[in-house]
Each structure stands twice: as C-alpha cells, then as structure tokens.
Image: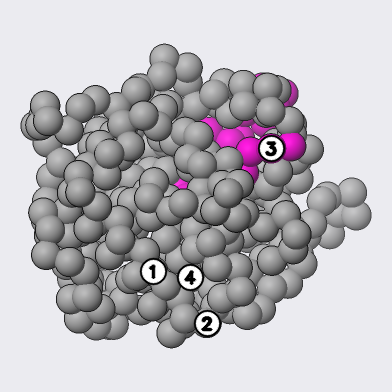
Amino acid sequence: MDADAPTQTEPRPLILDVDTGIDDMIALLIAATSPEINLRGVTCVAGNVEIHHVARNTGKILRMVGRGDVPVSIGAARPLERRLRTAPDTHGPTGTGYVELRGEDRQLGTTEYTAIPASRYLGAHVSRHPGEVTVLALGPLTNLASAVISGVDLAAGTREVIWMGGTLEERGNTTETGEWNACVDPEAVESCLAAGALHRMFPLDATQDIVFSMDDLRALPDTHLAGIVRDAVRFYVGFHQKADGIDGAYLHDPVVLIGSLLRPDLVTETVTETLACDTSSDAHLAGSLYRAESDDRPSTSVATAIDPEGMKSELIARLGRAVGAPNS
C-alpha cells in the first residue's frame, strides 16, 4: 500500500457497518483484535437478520474478545423504501448458524450501546474528524444512504468508504444478476453511488475467489470461541453445499476486511467503474449493478480478483489469534 498504509504505531480509525450474520461475525472478530485497526465503533443495520439480532450478536462478539469498549450504534431496522428481507436459511434463525448468542455472561462485562442512531453516529465522526475515519460497510447500505440523504458528505468527509456488495460479471447470489446486500436495499446503493460515497467496492467477483472448508478451521485453537465459530460456519457450509454445490463457504466479509485494509497486496485485479443500481419494481432486476451512462456520476474502484491461497492463510491466521485471545 502507499505511505498512508496503517502501521502498528498508527492504527487506522475504522467504523464497521454490519448486519451480523456468520461472515460479519468473523470480520468483527478480526477487526476487533487486529493491531493495525483502531475500531472506533460498529453500526448495525438489518439485513441477514432483524436489527435486534444484529445488535445482540455484535455486542456479544465484541465482549467475547474483550472489546466491550467499542461503541455499538443501532441503525436502520428496514430498508429505505422496501420491506425487509432476511436470510435465516443462510445464517440461521438468529444470524449465527447452529449457535445462538443468547443469555448473559456477567463475567464478560457489557458493551457500550450508544443512543445515537447509526446515520447520525456516522455524521458525528465525519464532522468531528474530517478525512480521518474509514467506513467499511459489510451489509445493506441503508445506514450510509440515510447519512447521505441527511446531508453527511461521506465522499469527502471520510478517509475512505468501502463496501462488500454487488456483482459485475459473476452470477448473483440472490437473483441472476443481484447480490444479497444490494438486493435488500437497492435504493440505498443507488443513493450512495450517485453521491460518490463508495470509494471502493468488493463484489462477488472478488469475494467468491476463495472457498473455506471445515478442514480449514481445524487450524483454530481449541477454545470456547473457536467452537462457536466452527458451529456457525458449519451451518454456512451446509447452506452453500445445497445452494452452490461447493464443499465449503464464501466468507465475503472478512475477505473484504483483509483485502481492503490489512493485506491489500492480496487483491490482484481492480477496475474503475461508473456504476448505478437498478431500483425498479422488477424483483429479478432490482439490486443489479450496471455501468452508468452519466458523465457527472463519480466512479469507484472495484476489486475483481484476490489471491485465494494468500487470503485463506491470512484469514485463518488472524481468526486463530482472535479466537485464541484470553477472553475467549
């Protein structure tokens, strides 16, 4: 990366925007325990599961690795204009597969849930620390679009905004041409693209370069938290076996976290595109990305290929450190 790349002495300020299902959980674990990152906060959005599951999962995961100090902001409970659709068949009834993060363990302490809703939380960071914070969005873009609509300049006010979502040439995982995060809230994607609020994107074209199997998780230490991760991913693998015919799972969100911020050298191909998102009433088209004709629309950098072996070893190593932490 360039001279602005994060170092261990200057961790990169980051806000994660999540709809905590299984792959978000792994991204959270890695972000919360990577010394290169200063996790300033986590904003929650409904997507994989309903917002109350997202908030609970997020808070509990942070506490499990001793990061109850990270503020959690609860955001949009539904898309901008559409009814919420969730993915219990993909992520389980509460978002964490065969395990459910219910109940309270007082020894873990508490998470700081902020009373400020996510769109205002993002706006506050932009106004107080202009050009400093990176926002990594791993779910539907409802929170970011709400901030944009309310006047927050994410394009100029952040160091960078990165999104896991969409697909260019790869077949969609929700419709033939649509990826899940984009299909849940197409209007939010279009608002962000039109405003130039997405500096970089990681679509399915990049994140589906790597398939993780249960054998890959054998390298994790034998801890309680590692067991939770294995049980969650086992559910995810079962879904992908039926849906995609692969013996493993795509861990989209942690792949994007690592490829964008921790090991950008693992991204082997990028393209610059000027994109728009279909917001029609046609369920087969809504959420599909297409190349925009408009000259005044900002372009975005899109990752299209990732080194699969390098990414797999990096992700498993970082996840192993996260789940091997003393608090796990």
Hey, what amino acid is under mark 1? Leu
Local crowd size for mark 1, using a 10 Å CA cut-off: few (<14), some (14–19), many (≥20): many
Foreground mark, 2 or 4, reads 2
Local crowd size for mark 2, using a 10 Å CA cut-off: few (<14), some (14–19), many (≥20): some
**Which residue was labeled with disc 1?**
315
Identify the element where label 3 is drawn: loop
Residue appearing at x 22%, y 58% in the figure: 324
Q: Which mark is residue 132?
A: 3
Residue 217 x/y as whole percent = 22, 73
**Which residue was labeled with disc 2?**
307
**Sequence-first disc among 2 and 1:** 2
Magenta stretch: give its range: 131-152
Local crowd size for mark 4, using a 10 Å CA cut-off: few (<14), some (14–19), many (≥20): many
**Which residue was labeled with disc 4?**
207
Front residue of this view, candidates 320 and 182: 320
Residue appearing at x 33%, y 45% in the figure: 20
Q: Is residue 183 above or below residue 245?
A: above
Foreground mark, 2 or 3, reads 3
